Image: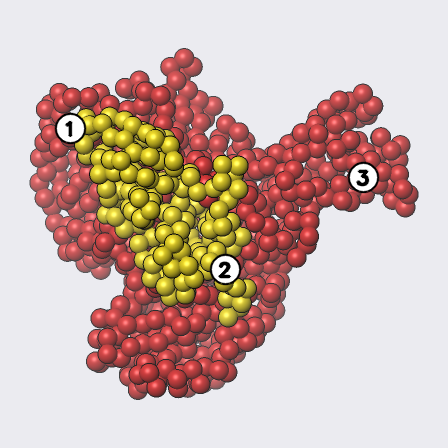
Chain colours: A yellow, B red
Amino acid sequence: MTEVSMTVNGRPVRADVPDNTLLADFLRENLELTGTHVGCDTAQCGACVVHVNGRAVKSCNIFALECEGAEVATIEGEAAPDGTLSAIQQAFQDHHGLQCGFCTPGMVMSAKALLAENPEPTEAEIRAYLKGNICRCTGYHNIVRAIMAASGQDVSNIAAE
Amino acid sequence: MPADGGIGASTRRREDVRFLTGQGRYTDDINIHNQAHVFFLRSDMAHGRINGIDISAAEKMPGVLKVFTAADFAEVGGIPCGWQVTDRFGEPMQEPKHPVLAEGFVRHVGEPIAAVVADTLQQARDAAEAIEVDIEALPAVVDMAAALEDGAQKVHEDLKSNLCYDWGFVEENRDAVDEAIRKAPHVTTLELVNQRLVANPVEPRVAIGVHDRADDEYTLYTTSQNPHVIRLLMGAFVLGIPEHKLRVVSPDVGGGFGTKIFHYQEEAFCTFAAKVVNRPVKWRASRSEAFMSDAQGRDHVTKIELALDEEGHFLAIRTSTLANMGAYLSTFAPSVPTWLHGTLMAGNYRTPLIYVNVRAVFTNTVPVDAYRGAGRPEATFQLERVIDKAARELGIDPVEIRRRNFITEFPYETPVALTYDTGDYHATMDKLMELADRDGFEARAAESKKRGRLRGFGVNCYIEACGIAPSNLVGQLGARAGLYESATVRVNATGSVTVMTGSHSHGQGHETAFPQVIASMIGIDPSQVEIVHGDTARVPMGMGTYGSRSLAVGGSAMVRAAEKVIDKARKIAAHLLEASAEDIELKEGRFTVKGTDKSVAWGDVTLAAYVPHNYPLEDLEPGLEETAFYDPANFTYPAGAYACEVEVDPETGKVTVERFAAVDDFGTIVNPMIVDGQVHGGLGQGIGQALLEGCVYDDEGQLLTASYMDYAMPRADDLPFYSVDHSCATPCTHNPLGVKGCGEAGCIGSPPTIVNAVVDALQRAGHDVTHIDMPLTPSRVWAAMQG
Ligand code: FES
Ligand code: FES
């Protein structure tokens, strides 16, 4: 057991964990932040994406101890404290970018990282960026539209193209 | 779009808010106080005889509560199969026992041999490594044709052979079909493979068993599409727990696609073990476990012959299919290649004579069962591929040959036992030609050519039987359950409504769409309606969600219950308004005496039902709650026409989908946004099957595709934007909403569209290619081009 401390969604946390505890398990089990999901064991699905020091990271692929002192952001910190959805969250709802919701936290966190580095990505750039996020429900159409819309692009003609 | 959020409105989904903020409640998010964890020791061998299992070292490992083997389940039944197929000769199918933990033999990679329950998952996993299993390898049966040869190694020693059944449909047509094919001016033959797929919902399966000693009650939390069915199967057939002592809860479920319909060993194990160790027992599948324990899909090998006259009119169809069952019969496995496949072989066409033969085969592979579409994609794929091949052989345009054979009069009785109630296949094809801009294809093909790419146009139609299913009919066909749905509509005193439905939402948006229906019926705001699902303690009975049945069957039950409620409320209103019930109409949330301005609000009537001070107590009971069971009179028949354009890179064989258009007739649409999304998702999976996915076993039965590294899931950059349309609607004639179901269409209609387009692209470039088996990987396409 080793003590680890970090800031999660702006709140300082600390716990004793076995050294091999993954960040995903630390978030889910120790902090009960179950919005971060685990969908695979080979770092492929992206359901577990969170931000560590502002970078999108697969939390199933990093030990909690590696995040000592880090700023971690999860889906639970994405909406405003009064519950108002962020622009990306709102776009996902407006454009039906989710069905079962299991991939959604990772998708939103990946989209947020994308828009931080590329404020107006093209369709192709979005699709390329989402390579590491698997969604089995939506066929990606509405996820890509939602991200384009969240970046301020007009998507009203896409469905009929 | 109606402004009121009722039927026809693209209302945003209310469930999204919890999913988008990380507040969803999936089974793995549930932890029960004092829970223990189970780790299953699974077979790494496809076939073997278990000579002994030594658990003595494992039992002494830290944290271990108990190590289970088959011996602990001696008093427990096997995992039951819910459908019995009768073969061509009137005999029942061969049905092996499917034990909770392997009994004497292992029969597929991933079969659980032993289970360790410990304080932590790590301890359970460590202890499982200390279990010594003495297994003697037996030859693995992998290839279906070889499995049926005389003297083949048997998967089940106690069965006569590896043949589960040899099914003929319609058996009486067999000779007439043979004769028609012998005499036909033209016969097109195609041999094809519908490869094995893995459903792969992103949420892996989870089960938590809880036993309460105080009253000997069990609770199972599980990632299921139909908790009531699990309660019935597991309670009655496996563990012998009466239903009133067993609660099954399926909270938010992260996608199903069929593979979460079935009852699995891990569910029975956790429920059983919870009592034995007197602690809640939790299991969560890793992705690799999911690959070797979730029932897989498809896996048909088919020869189809289509007889035509000189003008391309269809005369007869004969098919012969080998269908892989895997090592054991999963819950609905026998029904998929038979009643969900053979009955669909008429497609959208008038073909007077059809004969379908299916031989289902046991192999040393993971069990196969329904995967999105279930049988219908297999039927559509072979039919639409052989039609395309025939069109090319006869020099008839692929669209024209389809049009020439379309069914145009309804109801239409097919030679394979279905009666289509309604449809307009020419209208959907007209719309498709417009949406896909077929006229612009040549210009786009020329442009592709300039870039050195081969462009092809593929077209395809489909029909499916959804709204599963009339109970008396499926009973005759071998189903061991009814397939109705139930709903309770509970009106609360202040007028809000709680609907308990036996349907289950795992992405389909029932919590949003179902209230739209109630809101339209009563004239209240949809926010006043709440949907409860996924808990046997809260919902009276249910058959669950699969076969695109939720709105058609579950929604119809809800409508029937709501009609009963409204009927009673009208009588109460009549009393309050001192009028006769026949004169009362309900509009926009008020009961009005026809032709007068005398009215009373919905909320006042509902309050009177629960505070019956001024109430016709001599005629009516207080309260306002009704339950309905709805058993459909027929299947529903969504149908559509799809087209796509692909580009093939002749250097590499890589296929890209450039355009995809889908025109579907789903009848009445409640929420167009949700329906579009269902089609998109189905298209993603169907294109995945056509281009990327395939579950592969080697000759020893080793599963080579056991992770997302090896199994090619479609990713965002593999797929295009889709154009979808559902304006050609012919409402279903036999359910109250006129709905047909939309969940599987995209997955059924898209694979042949893609293959047809690739064959078109290659033929246009002068390659003599008539078929390529899916997935159309670059290497397969490239090899086909080399001749
Ligand atoms: S759980 Fe992290 S990538 Fe799949
Ligand atoms: S919404 Fe279900 S996996 Fe993406």
* B34 relative to B228 in the view: left or right: left
Q: Nearer the viewer, residue B180 or B31?
A: B31
Q: Which residue is mark 2?
A: A152
Residue type marked 3: Phe
Residue occupying the point 34% across, 71% down? B656
Residue farthest to the top, as pictured: B214
| Mark 3 vs mark 2: in front | 2
Residue type marked 2: Gly
* Residue A71 in the image, given as x and y percentages of width and height: 32, 39
Report if residue B547 is visible in the image. no
Distance Cα–Cα, label 3 vs label 2? 46 Å
Q: Which residue is mark 1?
A: B127
Distance Cα–Cα, label 1 vs label 2? 54 Å
* B60 relative to B81 in the view: left or right: left
Q: Secondary structure at mark 3?
A: strand
Report if residue B728 is visible in the image. yes
Q: Are marks 3 and 1 in contact (CB under 8 Å)?
A: no
* Picture quarter with the C terminus of chain B: bottom left
Residue occupying the point 70% across, 41% down? B524
Chain at numbered mark 1: B
Q: Does ligand 1 reach within 8 Å of label 1's beta carbon?
A: no
Residue occupying the point 80% across, 20% down? B613
Chain at numbered mark 3: B
Q: Answer few, some or many: residues within 10 Å of disc 1's Cα (few below 14, many 20 plus, some between 14 and 19).
A: many
Q: Answer few, some or many: residues within 10 Å of disc 3's Cα (few below 14, many 20 plus, some between 14 and 19).
A: many
Asked if badge 1 and badge 2 are on a common chain, one would say no
* B617 relative to B652 in the view: left or right: right
Q: Nearer the viewer, residue A112 or B472?
A: A112
Q: Which residue is mark 3?
A: B591
